[in-house]
Image (cartoon, grey):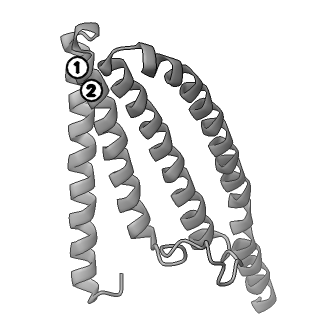
Amino acid sequence: MRTLETAIERLLFGSRWLLAPFYLGLALAVFVLLGKFLQELMHFLPAATRGTEKEAILGILTLVDLSLVANLLIIVIFSGYESFVSKLDVGDHVDRPDWMGKVSFSGLKLKLFGSLVAISGIDLLKVFMNLSDVTDRQLAWKVGIHVTFVISGVLFALMDRLAETRTGGEH
């Protein structure tokens, strides 16, 4: 019976590798975002010199938004892979981010919500700059979604802090 138990445990432990294709897919998504970023940049550059200040700011906000989404994907890829699949064997590479290998699942959730709030905030700022193009209903939905992200992020942080306090920092 112990042999069966050992085989099942090894199979379950090995099944973590089923997540690897998800992280590879997210890495491909970063390339897709790079393409969109370059597309937006090519659209933005001529418009920035000929367009209005408002158009320039909206273009910049779009580029920042795409950059934040790409950063979020990298955080999810590195942290998720290291937390659930395997440690990344890059040694003490000079370009290794300081947070890599140190972000817990709890920290990953907080970074995720922080990024979502920032992305939502930028989207909301773009909407505020184009109020004439947005209905009151659309604006209410955008504000409601943003507030939901903010409240959810605060609640997750509070839950993590409570859990950390209860476990004596072993979270």
Residue 165 vs 37, above or below: the answer is below
Q: Residue at x 50, y 52 (%)?
A: 71
> Do labels 1 and 2 touch, CB within 8 Å?
yes
Q: Residue at x 81, y 89 (%)?
A: 3
The amino acid type of the residue labelled 2 equals Lys
Depth check: give the residue in front, 63 or 147: 63
Looking at the picture, how far across and down is residue 42, in whole percent?
Answer: 59, 24
Q: Residue at x 50, y 23 (%)?
A: 44
| Distance Cα–Cα, label 1 vs label 2 | 5 Å
Residue lying farthest to the front in this orientation: 49
Instruction: Report whether 143 appears left or right of 122.
Output: left
**How many neighbours does mark 2 have within 10 angstroms: few (below 14), some (14-19), or many (20 or more)?**
some
Looking at the picture, how far across and down is residue 81, in whole percent?
Answer: 62, 66
Q: Is the C terminus in the top left, top right, bottom left or bottom right quadrant?
A: bottom left
Give the quadrant of residue 49: top left
Depth check: give the residue in front, 62 or 29: 62
What element does badge 2 sit on? helix
Looking at the picture, how far across and down is residue 85, in whole percent?
Answer: 66, 70
Depth check: give the residue in front, 69 or 52: 52
Residue 14 vs 80, above or below: the answer is below
Looking at the picture, how far across and down is residue 157, in whole percent?
Answer: 25, 64
Q: Which mark is residue 139?
A: 1
The amino acid type of the residue labelled 1 equals Leu
Residue 169 vs 42, above or below: the answer is below
What element does badge 1 sit on? helix
Give the quadrant of residue 82: bottom right
Residue 166 vs 31, above or below: the answer is below
**What is the count of numbered marks?**
2
Q: Is the N terminus in the top left, top right, bottom left or bottom right quadrant?
A: bottom right
Instruction: Report whether 26 appears left or right of 126.
Output: right
Q: Residue at x 21, y 29 (%)?
A: 143
Q: Which mark is residue 142?
A: 2
